[in-house]
Image (tube, rainbow, N blue to C red):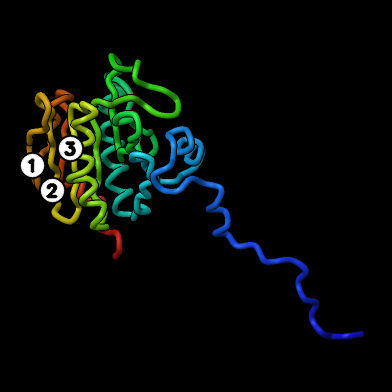
Amino acid sequence: MSSQPIAPTHEPEYAWELATLYPEQGGWSEAEYLDLTDGTNRRIEFVDGRLEFLPMPTEIHEALVQFLFMALYQFVDHRKFGKVYFNGIRVRIRPGKTRLPDVLFLHKDHFHVRHNRVWDGADLVMEVVSDDPKDRIRDYEQKFVDYVEAKISEYWIIDPERRLVTIYQLQGEKYVVHGEYLPGQQANSALIEGFVVDVLALFAVAEDIPE
């Protein structure tokens, strides 16, 4: 009996062949985007037919998001003001553009914009800036413009590198700085009266996380 290995009788299959099942960048519809991301933990945003893949979160990023979510959720839920979610609720900026805020709040008076797969707005959003330079541009520039376009009343940018919380308030057709807060200060919402975040306590949650 021959000990020679038997040659394969078919061509090998490669994972990249799966790419042919999907549209090219620029050719995605919103329905295709929603079908791709439904029921998964994929961090993907949708911008004019293109998929934008967000960086995988670090532990520092998730610790800050969790702190902010818990603080806002407890404040809002106790007063029955509305809904607070994190990392997964898609917000339609306009037809053809969908973002994924790290934390978001919607007042109960605006529940008509809620839909199971994607919301048509929000009242307050928070973004924790990641280390990726592209993410800094996305949060400080691209999403800054997007959230104005979506008429989101308040935008928080949490920057671990600068240890800074910046709150922007929508006035007319632009954001203005409501406040910039460093450790030792209390970041206070202009929209949600009485809601504050201790900036020192916020950044302290990441201090024991190794690089």
User: In this orientation, does residue 73 appear?
Assistant: no
Q: Which residue sits at x=10%, y=24%? A: 172
Q: Amino acid at mark 1?
A: Glu
Note whether residue 164 is visible. yes
Q: Residue at x 34, y 55 (%)?
A: 58
Q: CA distance from mark 1 to mark 2?
A: 7 Å
Q: Going 41% across and 48% down the picture, which residue do you hit? A: 25
**Seen in the image, is 51 located left or right of residue 165?**
right
Q: Mark 3 or 2 closer to N-term? A: 2
How far across and down, in percent of the image, does residue 173 sit?
12, 27
**Viewer-nearest of discs 1 and 3:** 1
- Report if the CB atoms under discs 1 and 3 are less than 8 Å apart: no
Which quadrant of the figure has residue 119?
top left
Label 2 secondary element: strand
Mark 3–mark 2 distance (CA, rounded to whole Å) = 12 Å
Q: Earlier in the sequence, mark 1 or mark 2?
A: 2
Residue under label 3, please give it: 197
Q: Quadrant of residue 194?
A: top left
Residue contact between numbered discs 1 and 2, judged by CB atoms under 8 Å: yes
Where is residue 2, by image quadrant? bottom right
Identify residue for label 1.
180
Residue denoted by label 2: 164
Q: Amino acid at mark 3?
A: Val
